Image (spheres, rainbow, N blue to C red):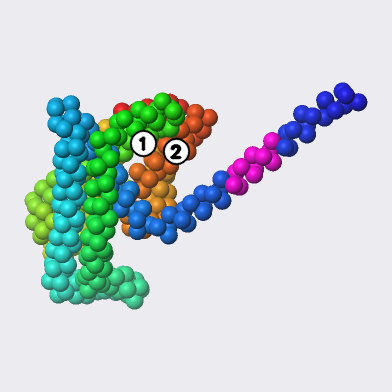
Amino acid sequence: MAMDQAGAHPADASPARAGTRFNSIVIGVAGTLVALIAMRQFADLIGPLFLALNLMITAYPVHTWLVRKGTPSWLSAVAVALTVFAVLIAMVVGFIWAVNEMVGLLTDYGDEFNKLYEQVLALAAQFDFNTDAIGGLVGSIDPNSILGAASSLLSGASGLVAMLGVVIAALVFMAMDTPGMEARMRRLASNRASIAHAMGIFAAGVRRYWLVTTIFGIIVAILDGIALAIMGVPLAVVWALFSFLTNYIPNIGFVVGLVPPALVALFAKGWQAAVLVIVIYSVLNFVVQSIIQPRFTGESVGVTPTVSFISLLLWTGVIGGMGTLLALPLTLLVKALVIDVDPRTRWVNALIASDPADADEPHET
């Protein structure tokens, strides 16, 4: 009897373990959905607060450098916060200016669009194409409809300005906490070493992501601006600035930055110039952002293109427009809290990291 019970125990335990695992998965999925729904309800607060946190994390090494040079810790924190605030204001003002210039320019191309519309219909008729379908396609790029979209974007920019109030308040309080942050992290490391390690990985990844994205965004913007200026495309400086700002949107930022100058080139210079703009932007984007930039970004930040794209869709749906800007940092935070904090789950890095060779042991930089 005892032998029968002993022999039956392993067989009975396996379904029990499977049931426990299934329940854990169901609870985890349900908890994730509840968390995402809750985040959606407070998106207007979460987005600006997380943006402010990202900016302070990125600028924190400047604070530590100033302290090492003898600057009082509180004064260093204030200087860093003011610098971050100035950079943020400059980017918002630049975005509003670029969109405003685009709105003003597109109103001047009504006649050019009508000529293009007639030429396309005439060419379609020569080859016996469906002129109604082609006319509807060409009509979708009517400057009036584009102007409406640009005006809506400009209205959205005013909403972005309103969110600056939350970001500024967050920066003020985070600056007050900055002088004691190093001591807090040491205390955390002594009590919860794995959590402190994961937070260090997150901070290093966020810092590298923003710095590298900014540097290569500037490089691409300068090259785009030079190419557009040589071609004689109107408002080359505006499109260069727009290219720099949209570079912060992963995956689709390149397309968003390409559409306005390509349309302006089409209306101002003809279809050949528009095609050339598309080719130049595509080549620069592929060479700089797909070949060179990943080598500098580092594998501690990199995730696969699929994970990056899914992150963009997910976080945009959860926190709205700010999700396009914060998609990868939010993904890095989730990765740190769920995967990097527990050595047993780091195998997931092999599936999501851009280079799985270094996925098992994440490191700080």
Give residue 304's quadrant in the image: top left
| CB atoms of marks 1 and 2 within 8 Å | yes
Q: Which residues are magenta?
A: 17-27
What's the residue at 77%, 29% (across, down)? 10
Give coordinates of residue 307: x percent, y percent: 42, 44
Which mark, residue 337?
2
Give coordinates of residue 57: x percent, y percent: 28, 39
Per the image, the residue denoted by label 1 is 202
Q: Is residue 24 magenta?
A: yes
What's the residue at 20%, 44% (across, down)? 81
Give residue 108's quadrant in the image: bottom left
Name the residue type under label 1. Answer: Phe
Tell me the CA gap for discs 1 and 2: 9 Å
Q: Is residue 150 magenta?
A: no
What's the residue at 15%, 64% (across, down)? 100
Q: Which residue reaches farthest right? A: 1
Report the quarter where the C terminus lies.
top left
* Residue 248 shows in the view: no
Q: The residue tagged with tag 1: helix, strand or loop?
A: helix
Give coordinates of residue 155: x percent, y percent: 24, 67
Report the quarter where the N terminus lies.
top right
Front residue of 185 and 125:
185
Give coordinates of residue 118: x percent, y percent: 22, 75
What's the residue at 19%, 55% (across, down)? 92
